[in-house]
Amino acid sequence: MAEEARARAVAAVFLNGQYEPEPAFYRQAAEGASMLIGADGGAAWMIKLGLLPSVVVGDFDSLSPLALEELQAKGVRSVRHPVRKDRTDAELAVGEALRMGAGAIDVFGGLGAGFDYAVGHVALLRGLARRRVPARLLEPALTFMVMPARSRLSVSAPPGSRFSLQPLTQRAVVSLRGFDYELRAARLRADACRGLGNMVTRHDAEVLVHAGLAAVHVGAPLQPFWSGMTA
């Protein structure tokens, strides 16, 4: 992980998604987090994983009253919101992480609650990238993030790992080094698929986003957070 990301407080946000069949991955991935946040039913998954949240957030329609009481008895803070609201539990949990001082955010269970919610969680990462807050959607076999302009990612995935990149603005200017298809300050369009289906070929692969916003998918777990370019 880059020095810039290491200096930040990292929040691990657990959503009400899918955590099987590799629950050990999520326990290990959350070990280095400064704060653990359960988004409603995500807190129930944390209990199953043997993790104690720092705070639980949501309308609590998917976390049982008994589970909530047990967490509160253990000193876990709870932030209740109305059932009818304009933001999802994921948005509320990410907002709570920012209020608690998180400078980087890991989101777990964000891709297993249906395609519509997965798209929404990509939108959340897009908003965080615009604020220059690094964030990752993490699953056992992939890392997904949104990189803003003037950001850099040092890929630690082994050669042969799948890699895709897609602009989230009308155009993004991107360089790729250490991939099967390399790019040098290439202008990619949001309505084309030029960045999909690539492959890591070197251990020192690197992604540079010079302009625009780009969604990055690496077919390997726990890739580093992106960092800002220094030059």
Image (tube, helix red, strand yellow):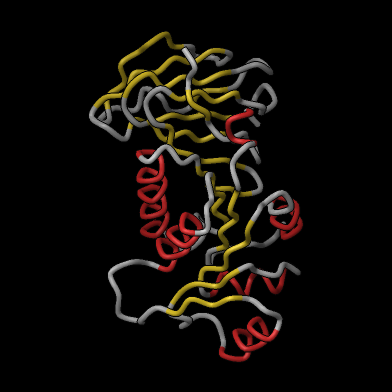
How far across and how far down the image is residue 165, in percent?
43, 29
At which x and y percent is residue 152? 50, 23
Q: Is residue 77 above or below residue 159?
A: below
The picture places residue 51, in percent across and down from the top left corner, at 72, 67
In the rendered structure, the answer to whether residue 120 lies left or right of residue 21 reads left
Hey, which residue is sitting farthest top in the picture? Answer: 184
In the picture shown, does residue 90 fall above or below 177?
A: below
Which residue occupies 54% across, 25% down? 153
What residue is drawn where x is 64% and y is 62%?
Answer: 19
In the rendered image, the quadrant that contains the N terminus is top right
Q: Nearer the viewer, residue 2 or 23?
A: 2
Q: To which quarter of the image does residue 169 belong?
A: top left
Residue drawn at the location 30% of the way across and 75% of the way down? 85
Is residue 27 rendered to the left or right of residue 136?
Answer: right
Question: Measured along the vertical axis of the image, is residue 118 above or below residue 89?
Answer: above
Compare residues 216 and 10 and report the one nearer the observer: 10
Q: Residue drawn at (60%, 21%), measured in percent from left and top?
A: 200
- How many discs mark residues in the rendered view? 0
x, y percentage for residue 80?
45, 79
Taking depth in this image into account, of 95 and 111 the one nearest to the observer is 95
Horizontally, residue 202 falls left or right of residue 112, namely: right
